[in-house]
Amino acid sequence: MKLWEYIVRRMFLLIFVLVGVTIITFFLSQVLLDPLALYLTEKTPISAIPSIIVHYHLNDPWPIRYGIYLWNLLQGDWGYSKSLTEPVLAGLSQRFPATMELAIAAILWTLVVGIPTGIISALRNNKLPDHVSRLVALTGVSTPVFWLGLLLQLVFFYYLGQLGLPHLPSNGRVDSTLVLSYPITTVTGLLLVDTLITGNWVMFGDALAHLVLPSFALGFISMGVITRIMRSSMLEVLRQDYIILARSKGLSERVVIYRHALKNAMIPTVTVAGLAIAGLLGGAPLTETVFGWPGMGRLAVSAIGRNDAPLIMGFTLIAALILVVANLIVDILYAYLDPRIKY
Amino acid sequence: MRRSNWSPALAELKFAGNLLIQNRVVLGGTIIAIGVMLTALLGPIIVSPTVATDISLPARLQPPSAAHWLGTDDYGRDLLQMIILSTRLDVIAMLEIVGAGLAIGVTLGAFSGFIGGTLDEALMRITDIFFSIPGLVLALAVAAALGRGLDNLILAIIVVQWPGYTRILRGQVLAEKERLYVDALRALGIGRIRIIVRHIIPNTIYPVLVQCTLDLGGVILTFAGLSFLGFGASALTPELGRLITAGQNYIFEAPWLTAFPGLTILIISLAFNLVGDGIRDVLDPRLRR
């Protein structure tokens, strides 16, 4: 089978899985919760209720109601959010760039810290640095991300500030008074990109400073995972014949590792980096809440307090969509990186 | 286990024991995990459960001292005693979630793999769907639909946990059912259910148990995280995530209220992760070279 045939087959599976996800969100929002509640306010007259039920097909059999639900989703009608007083899809897409910016920065932290640590760990296999990195990696997956966020605020915002040292901001995406003097032109919604292309250097620095702590907290969970995978795949590669050959022809250890071993050892790491996106999306509601980051995760959390089911289900759908597409991209990348893989 | 004589099993046990003792990090994790379980078990004996309702406003927000080792919270309750009581709730929830997930996963996985056909295909596609939603997001959505409350939160995380165990066990069963002894049992006229329950499951469950140990640490993080967001136990119930929710209001004036409960979650999660990691190493044949 050729690569494109594989991609087409994967696309079909992707659609199947996404339809499955809508069955779950339909069940949660329309069967477990009373859908009638969505259309009622304190001012709705009781006499209007029967006509609401008929109009929104609330008494129809479930398969028909699911059909209507799916059809509406495909049309871009994801329901109306009472707490935002706007359509769900509009509310989510407005906050999508904030979450993406945070997630991308978190992935960068993960790779920049995780890959070198994994390499060092593999080269000092079973020595002190390896044990330390194992402990640090497991600490990463064992740390409550919301707690780490609070501690980072305490140290890098409060304590540094108390000492009169330059400190990092702990809340939001930009300084709300500074942005009044240097307004940001929205192009992509990613503040770092927008300020960069419009040459707004003051806000670029401010946005970058705001991004440091939340992205580190979010990335910290996956750092350990990447370290461990990098370590084990590096160990695997270093045992291969071609590495022995490279060493025996007298190449320096640096050339052997960085030129020959690293490329192949990176392949499993790429796959796991894709899977780590699931962890990032899961960590987003907690991290965004702690740092007052105006993204989709914080929106979903605030929706819980206001019983805004359409908004929560909308976030669930978007999270699934991102995860599924990310996995597809990783699989294609994997096939591209490793020509030995046949489908 | 299906062993013709006991000497290989003994050798195995000795190998595992040696590996654990050689690896001090894993040994340390095991000791802490045992300590955590004991704390959870003996919590109500060490600390009077009335501590949670023992409000004393003059004693509120005191820093750690000889009288209150970890300080006091905003209701004047001793933080160390609150943490001990909370540990019990969190650890029991963690065990309930993984236990229920295991029971569902093992049952579905065994029948799915053994019977095969349409049932197997349908179940595997359903697990695909569950895997395509990030765990914490799915738990959040289910918990939101079920409403607040401890039992609802536990149920929501069970919904996230079962598919993994189903998949692992089903894979094991697919290989196991091709073995000769299964044919022999069939030839003897033994029924399907009896073969699955008495022979297939006991022979295939070990990898799932390892996965369970590895999951314990993650489950307590999800549980505490969703509690922190306001699901689960009510505000006055001693629960570790809740303690941090209360503590973050005083993060700058009384940082110990946030630091110590979070550190407790970290230690519990880390201990179980170390044990799981160690067990996986013991069972990994590549390490025996």
Image (cartoon, coloured by chain):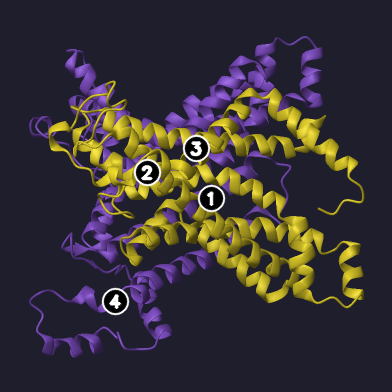
Chain colours: A purple, B yellow
Give the CA separation, mark 4 to mark 2: 34 Å
Q: Horizontal and vertical percent for residue B6?
A: 88, 45
**Are the numbered discs 2 and 3 placed on the same chain, yes or no?**
yes
Q: Residues within 10 Å of mark 1 (few under 14, many from 20)?
A: many
Give the CA separation, mark 3 to mark 1: 37 Å
- Residue holding disc 3: B36
Q: What element does badge 2 sit on?
A: helix
Closer to viewer: mark 3 or mark 1: 3
> Is B169 left or right of A207, judged from the image as shown?
right
Q: What element does badge 4 sit on?
A: loop
Question: Disc 4 is attached to a residue of which chain?
Answer: A
Q: In which quarter of the image is residue A117?
A: top right
Tell me which amino acid carries mark 4: Asp
Tell me which amino acid carries mark 2: Ser
Tell me which amino acid carries mark 3: Val
Q: Kindly tell me whether residue A199 is visible in this rendering.
A: no
Give the CA separation, mark 3 to mark 4: 41 Å
Instruction: Work out whether residue A138 or residue B122 is closer to the camera in this orientation and state it.
Output: A138
Q: What element does badge 3 sit on?
A: helix
Tell me which amino acid carries mark 1: Asn
Give the CA separation, mark 2 to mark 3: 12 Å
- Residue holding disc 4: A34
Question: Disc 3 is attached to a residue of which chain?
Answer: B
- Residue holding disc 1: A327
- Residue holding disc 2: B86
* x 75%, y 34%: residue: B16
Closer to viewer: mark 1 or mark 4: 4
User: In what quadrant of the picture does the N terminus of chain A appear?
Assistant: bottom right
**Are the numbered discs 4 and 2 placed on the same chain, yes or no?**
no
Is A83 placed above or below B93 here? below
Q: Quadrant of residue B220?
A: top left
